[in-house]
Image (cartoon, grey):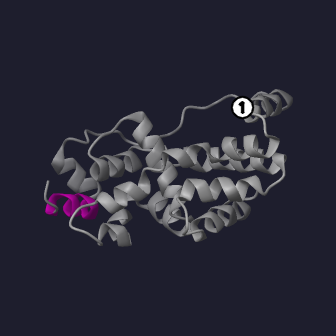
Amino acid sequence: METYEFWTIIETARAATDKPFDEALTDVLAELPLERILDYDERFSAIHASLYRWDVWAASFLISGWSCDDGFTDFRTGLISLGQEWFERVAAAPDSLADHPLADSSDTLDDLEEALLQEDANYAAPRAYDRVTGIKDSYHDAQDARAASQPKREDAEPDMGEKWDFENAGEMRRRLPRLAALCESLPS
């Protein structure tokens, strides 16, 4: 799946304001042929993995206050759910999240945190695939079959950039100045 097709699917789901993003995304994907659902998930995984960096994780820590693997997975999915424009802005400079309208819309970052923790959207492709086939867990079998038919590739360790202590306020201010200042100015 081409990148523009992926973002068209995301934007179509974002436009459905009558339901949560994950449900809208599942609905959009369920309209695709089965192979295209697998293609979407392959592209989703690549885009999602591109955000597996310490600077993005630090932004997640500032907004949510914790730094577990599951939370960071959901946060990266949330960045994708914001659409291509915001995804690209944050991928280029995680500190730009301080400019997001939801960061400015309340006395806390709760609205932005809620928008960014999109756990259920991680499972939109499997849910859509299973809905189309009518068979529970059919997605995983199809995904396994697809992987078996492709050449084996070596998974390289991602370059996460330089790691630092997220609990070091001075370091956070130095690396993510606007987001750290926004978080510091909010009541605890």
Query: Does any portion of residue 95 appear in the rendered image?
Result: no
86 left or right of 128? left
Q: Up-down: is 168 above or below 173?
A: above
In which quadrant of the rendered image does the N terminus lie? Answer: bottom right
The image quadrant of residue 65 is: top left
Q: Amino acid at mark 1?
A: Asp
Residue 29 in picture, x, y percent from top left: 72, 54
Residue 166 in picture, x, y percent from top left: 26, 42
Residue shown at the point (38%, 69%) measured from the top left: 100
The image quadrant of residue 24 is: bottom right
Residue shown at the point (34%, 52%) measured from the top left: 59
Query: Does any portion of residue 147 appear in the rendered image?
Result: yes
70 left or right of 16? left
Magenta span: helix, strand or loop, mainly?
helix
Q: Up-down: is 65 above or below 12?
A: above
73 left or right of 133? left
- Closer-to-camera residue (20/38): 20
As for residue 59 lying within the magenta part, the answer is no
The image quadrant of residue 110 is: bottom left
Q: What's drawn in magenta, residue-wise?
A: 177-185
Residue shown at the point (55%, 68%) measured from the top left: 18
Q: Residues within 10 Å of mark 1 (few under 14, many from 20)?
A: some
Residue shown at the point (28%, 54%) measured from the top left: 175
Residue under pointer 1: 137
